[in-house]
Image: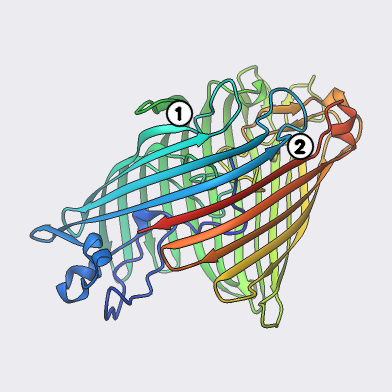
Amino acid sequence: MAACDPVRPEPPGDLRPGPLAHAQDAAAQPVVFAPLPYDDDFSYLADPALRTSPWAKLKYIPVGGQAYLTLGGEARLRTETREHLNFGRGVEDDGFDFQHRLRLWGDLNLTPNLRVYGELQATGTNGDNVPTRNPVDHNDIEGHQLFVEYAADYGDDGRFFARGGRQEILLGKGRLMDPRNGPNTRRAYDALRVQAAQGDWRLGLIGGQTVRDLNGAWANESNSDFTFLTAHAARKVDGVLGKGEIEFVYIHTDQETARVADFIGERDTYSLRVAAKKDALSYDVEAMLQGGETATGQDVEAWFVGLEAGYQLPGAWKPRIGARIDAGSGDDDPTDDKAQGFDALWGRGQSFTPEFGYTNMVHAGMNLNLNPIPKLNANFGVTALRRLSRDDGVYSLAPALIRGADEGQSREVGIRTTARFDYDWSRHVSTGFMVNHVSAGDFLKETGDGEDLFYTSVFITARF
C-alpha cells in the first residue's frame, strides 16, 4: 500500500540549517528534526558540556580532530485495512495487513566542509494477499542513501554544496520530486547535485537517474532507463504577495520504459510556484507546462495547475479552513500527433492512498484543520474527482491506466472523504490514524467495476 501524506508536507531539504544558536542543554534543547535527516546539524554539540544525555551523545561522537559522527534512526509501524483499492477490478489486496519501516543513518563529518552520509532502509508487509509483492511495500534491506558532500561558506551569508551519490531529493511542494514518505519504501536518486544560496536567492542543478526498487535484499539498482537533468531557482519575497518564496524549476527527462506508451520519450517540464503567508491567509500555487517528444514521434503538449490555500480562524482549537485544486491535462484525441497527458514524474500523491494520479484529472476539495489540544492535530477533507477529457481515461500516480476512455461517458469519477488524526507524544514519538473513502462516481460504475474504495491506517513513528 502506497499511502501518502497530504496533511504534513515536507519542506525543502536544500541546505543544512547550521548550528543551533544559544544552546544551553542538549537534553532540554527543543530540537525540531528536519524532514530529511541529512539536513540535521548537530555541530553545536561539539561542546562536551552540552552532551548531557544519551541522545546527545549519539548525535555527536568525536572521532578525532574536528571529525565527528552523528547516528540516527526511525521506526514506523503501521496497520492497514483495505477494500477495493482498484474499485473492484482485477486482483485486489483486501483485508488487514501490518507494515514496518526501519531506517538507520550515519553522518560522518570528516571536516567542517566534507562529510559522508549513509542510510539503511528495511521495509516489509505482512498479510498482503497479492501474487507478486510490490517492492514499494516490501523491500527487505537496502543501502538507501550513500553520498559524499563538500560544502563551504562564501561572502557574507553564502553557502555552497556539491553532493554526489545516492540521495533523497525534495523540491518545493513535492509536486515533481518527492522522497515518498507516505508509502512504505522511500524513494532515492543516483545523482550529482550542486547548490548555492546567498541572501534571498537559492540556485541549483541536479543530474542523474532514478533508483529502481526491486524485491529482495540489496537488490535495488540504478535505473538508466529514466534519466533527468534539473535546474531550479528560488527567491524569498516579502511584499504585497505576503512573506514566502517564488520558485522556478526545469526538469528534462528521458524515459525508455513506461506502463503507458505516451510517457516514453523525452519530456521538458517547466514549473513556476509561489508560496507565501499574509496575515491569516497562506497559499501555495504552481503552474506547469510540459513539452518534448514521445518515442513514437508525438509532440508533448501537457499542463498542470495546483493550488492549496488556507485561512486561519480565531478560536481555541485553531481552526483552519483550506481549499485544494489540482488539475492535470489529458489527451483529447489519442489518434493525432500530440501527447497531452500530464506526467507528474516523482510527485507526491494527493491522498492517503494515491488511487488516482494527476493525468486527465481534476481534484477539487475543501478541508478543515483543528488542534483540540496542543499535541493533537485533526484534519477532515472532501474532494470531488472528475476527469477532464472524455477521450482519455483515468490513471494511477505511476502513471498506469486504471480505466480506459471508451469504458464510460461520464466525467464524474467519485467523491473522496478523508480524516486524519496525529498526536505527538514527544519530539521522538508520534501516533496517528487515517481513513480514506472514495464513493465511486458514474464513470467508474459505467465501466462495470465500480465498488467504493475504503482504507484505514493506524501508525506509530519513533525517531532518534
Q: Is residue 338 above or below residue 46?
A: above
Report the side of 190 relative to 386 (left or right): left
Q: Residue at x 43, y 26 (%)?
A: 223
Q: Secondary structure at mark 2?
A: loop
Q: Residue at x 86, y 23 (%)?
A: 406
Tell me where residue 387 sits by quadrant: top right
Q: Is residue 290 above or below residue 352?
A: above
Q: Amino acid at mark 2?
A: Asn
Name the spot of residue 176 as percent of width and height, x first: 56, 44
Tell me where residue 190 sits by quadrant: top left
Q: Residue at x 44, y 62 (%)?
A: 429
Q: Nearer the viewer, residue 290 or 137?
A: 137
Q: CA distance from mark 1 to mark 2?
A: 26 Å
Report the side of 421 relative to 368 (left or right): left
- The quadrant in which the N terminus is found is top right
Lower position in the chain sequence, tag 1 or tag 2: 1
Number of marks in the rendered image: 2
Q: Nearer the viewer, residue 35 or 1?
A: 1
- The quadrant in which the C terminus is found is bottom left
Q: Secondary structure at mark 1?
A: strand
Q: Is residue 449 above or below residue 100?
A: above
Determine the residue located farthest toward the left in the rendered image: 65
| Residue identified by numbered label 1 | 212
Q: Is residue 35 visible?
A: yes
Q: Nearer the viewer, residue 178 or 370?
A: 370
Name the spot of residue 340 as percent of width and height, x first: 73, 32
Name the spot of residue 312 as percent of width and height, x first: 68, 75
| Residue identified by numbered label 2 | 360
Determine the residue located farthest toward the top in the rendered image: 296
Report the side of 368 relative to 181 (left or right): right
